[in-house]
Each structure stands twice: as C-alpha cells, then as structure tokens.
Image (spheres, helix red, strand yellow):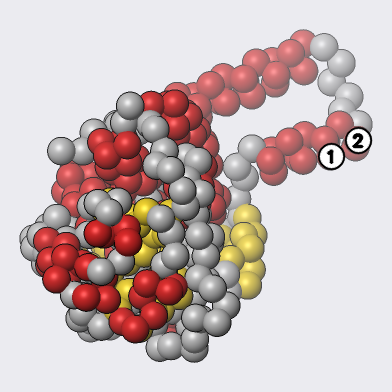
C-alpha cells in the first residue's frame, strides 16, 4: 500500500484577496499624501505587476513561444501523462486523454492513471479519447481556452497540432527527458498556478530528504530499467530519466549503458530518457550489481524470473532485484511519491 501525501497547495483565493487589500491600502495612502506620480514610479509599478502574474504572458515551450491572453479556465489535456501535473497544481482541466481502461495497478475505468484518479473524479474530468485513437475534433465540444500536448511518447497528439491550434492555444511539453518538477513548473507558469507548483515541488523535496535519511543503500552499483510488455527486451533508463533523477538524489550509484551496446533501435530513438536493449544485450546493457525494475507488473515479474536473458543475471540470481509499482511508469507529483514509498519499503533501515 502506498503512502502518497496530500499535497500542500496554497489558497489562491486568499492570495487574490490579500493582493486586493494591499492594492487598496496603497491607493488610499497615495490619495492622502502627495498625489503626484512620476513616470519612473509608474514604470516600477508596472514591472511589479508583470512579475505578479499579469496577463497576457508569453511562455517558452517545447514548440516555440506561446502567448496567452488570459489565465486559462477550461483546459483540455491530450496527454494522460501531463494531466497528473495539471491536477497537482489544481489547474482547471475539463477533459483528458486516456490509456487503456482498467489496467491492473495502472489505470481506472476511464483509462486515467490510478495515482490521480480520485482527483480527476472529484474535479469531474471527462475522457477526451483513448491514446490509440486521438481525434482533434474531440476537443471542440469542451470549448477549451488551452490545450496541452505531449511533444512525443505514446500519448502524444503532436501530429495533430495544426488542427488543435485552430481550436485553442496549444502548450507543447516534452516530458521525455525532463524531471516532473520541470514539467510542473512549466505547467504552473502556463496556467497561472505558479505558487501551487512551487508548493508541491517543495513538499516533494522535503520528502526526498526524509526518505534519504530513512533508507540503507545497497552495496555496489545499480541499473534501472523497464521491461518491454512483449517480452522482447528492456529499456535502460538514462541519467535524464525522471526516475533515475530521483534515485540519484536518494544516493544510488547508477550505471549507464556501455557505448558499444547502444544502438539505433525503434523504441527510444527520439527520446533521451531510455535506451532500448534487445534480449541478447540486456545483461551487458545493465551492468549494475543491483537491478531496479521500474513499473513492474506481475507479467513483467514472471518475465524476469523465467526469461534466461533476465533470470541468469547476477542481480537476479543474487536476490538483488528490486521493483517499483506500475504507476511509476510516468512520473508526476503523485506517482513520484509512490516511487518514494516503494524505495522506502524495500530499503528502509
């Protein structure tokens, strides 16, 4: 059982009220004192307002600059992965793309990831489409003022961006080799939820410090990877993989795939977070004394125990194989906490 913490999110309404009270007090002081306002003072006031969340604003995205005229109020997420980060900052999502429905330990009846399924239901988010059959026209009925798109990976609708941009402004995010914190920061900026993004990141940073002090690291080096669902090999996680970034912060001595093993394979060739390994290269590509199988399901566990490419590895034979739950396949604030729960359970002092 996981122990994901309730996120600490600031109250945006209170912030707005405080800002309004402060502005009113300043205006009153001005009227009671010298009523002459210099151009320099006006310029400084404008600069302060710009830094305080004024709209319109221009954002650097993974598809160039995006200018938003006002804070989004109806967001459509075409990426089931990015929906988690939107929910973490309390962004007003009305519909989301989805993965397969009722996948054990991964998705709910809508195809939403289980780590944020409850939040989605509470917010009344509707299913936009299944990842396998995206259709830009589905977004029209939700009247969005912002559409969020993953630049690549299995839940990407980037190939339909021309049509999507005719419906609403499109925020493109490449999460493949970015930390979930960087993704959350970008989403917070685009949605006007910067404070909420800072809060959940700070909460997680505190949790990492706590877990690091509560675990005992295994001796030697560690290789982390994902087992392919078709039994045809594995994907080694690189230093850019969000999961590896967390493991590294916890103190694990992580290995990298030797240069002579790397190849231009179909899976991962356009991404920086994984390197595909054929069965014959699994052990050479994962040279760690310990193995961490990320996003491990029952089927993948059986594959590791029965397939010679995995089962004869020193880490498996020596009982130095560790796993993390299926929900850690894609990281957001919620699943990153699940990853910490898993590490604490297996390596706790």
Residue at horizontal 31 percent and vertical 82 percent from the top: 279
Left or right of 151? Residue 340 is left
- Image x and y of residue 110, in percent: 13, 62
Residue 158 vertical placement versus 295 (above, below) = below
Residue 153 vertical placement versus 102 (above, below) = below
Residue at horizontal 70 percent and vertical 19 percent from the top: 26
Q: What element carries label 2?
A: helix
Q: Is residue 74 visible?
A: no
Residue lying at the far top in this picture: please name it. 32
The residue closer to the viewer here, 39 or 57, is 57
Q: What element carries label 1?
A: helix
For residue 210, the mark is none
Residue at horizontal 76 percent and vertical 40 percent from the top: 46
- Image x and y of residue 3, in percent: 23, 33
Left or right of 243? Residue 21 is right
Left or right of 163? Residue 106 is left
- Name the residue carrying label 2: 40
Residue at horizontal 57 percent and vertical 70 percent from the top: 62
- Image x and y of residue 265, in percent: 43, 88
Quadrant of the drawing holding the C terminus: top left
Q: How crowded is mark 1: few (under 14 residues within 10 Å), some or many (20 or more)?
A: few
- Per the model, the C-alpha gap separating discs 2 and 1 is 5 Å
The residue closer to the viewer here, 115 or 244, is 244
Q: How crowded is mark 2: few (under 14 residues within 10 Å), some or many (20 or more)?
A: few
The residue closer to the viewer here, 299 or 23, is 299
Among the 4 quarters of the image, the one containing residue 302: bottom left
- Name the residue carrying label 1: 43
């Amino acid at each position: 059982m996981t122990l994901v913490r309730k996120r600490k999110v600031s109250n945006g309404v209170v912030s707005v009220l405080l800002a309004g009270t402060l502005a009113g007090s300043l205006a009153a002081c001005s009227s009671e004192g010298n009523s002459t306002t210099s151009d320099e003072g006006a310029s400084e006031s404008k600069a302060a307002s710009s830094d305080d969340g004024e709209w319109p604003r221009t954002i650097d995205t993974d598809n160039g600059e995006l200018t938003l005229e006002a804070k989004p109020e109806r967001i459509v997420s075409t990426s089931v992965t990015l929906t988690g980060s939107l929910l973490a900052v309390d962004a007003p999502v009305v519909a989301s793309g989805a993965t397969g429905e009722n996948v054990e330990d991964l998705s709910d009846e809508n195809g939403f990831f289980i780590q944020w399924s409850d939040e989605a239901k509470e917010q009344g988010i509707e299913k936009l489409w299944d990842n396998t059959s995206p259709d830009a026209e589905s977004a029209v009925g939700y009247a969005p003022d912002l559409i969020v798109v993953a630049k690549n990976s299995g839940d990407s609708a980037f190939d339909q961006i021309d049509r999507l941009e005719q419906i609403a402004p499109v925020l493109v995010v490449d999460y493949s080799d970015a930390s979930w914190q960087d993704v959350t920061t970008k989403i917070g900026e685009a949605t006007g939820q910067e404070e909420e993004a800072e809060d959940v990141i700070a909460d997680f940073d505190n949790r990492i410090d706590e877990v690091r002090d509560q675990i005992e690291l295994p001796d030697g080096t560690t290789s982390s990877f994902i087992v392919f669902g078709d039994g045809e090999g594995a994907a080694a996680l690189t230093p850019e993989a969000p999961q590896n970034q967390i493991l590294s912060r916890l103190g694990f001595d992580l290995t990298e795939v030797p240069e002579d093993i790397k190849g231009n394979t179909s899976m991962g060739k356009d991404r920086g977070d994984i390197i595909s390994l054929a069965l014959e290269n699994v052990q050479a590509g994962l040279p760690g004394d310990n193995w961490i199988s990320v996003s491990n399901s029952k089927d993948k566990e059986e594959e590791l125990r029965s397939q010679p490419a995995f089962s004869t590895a020193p880490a498996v034979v020596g009982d130095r194989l560790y796993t993390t739950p299926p929900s850690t396949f894609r990281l957001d604030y919620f699943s990153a906490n699940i990853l910490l729960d898993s590490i604490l359970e297996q390596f706790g002092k």
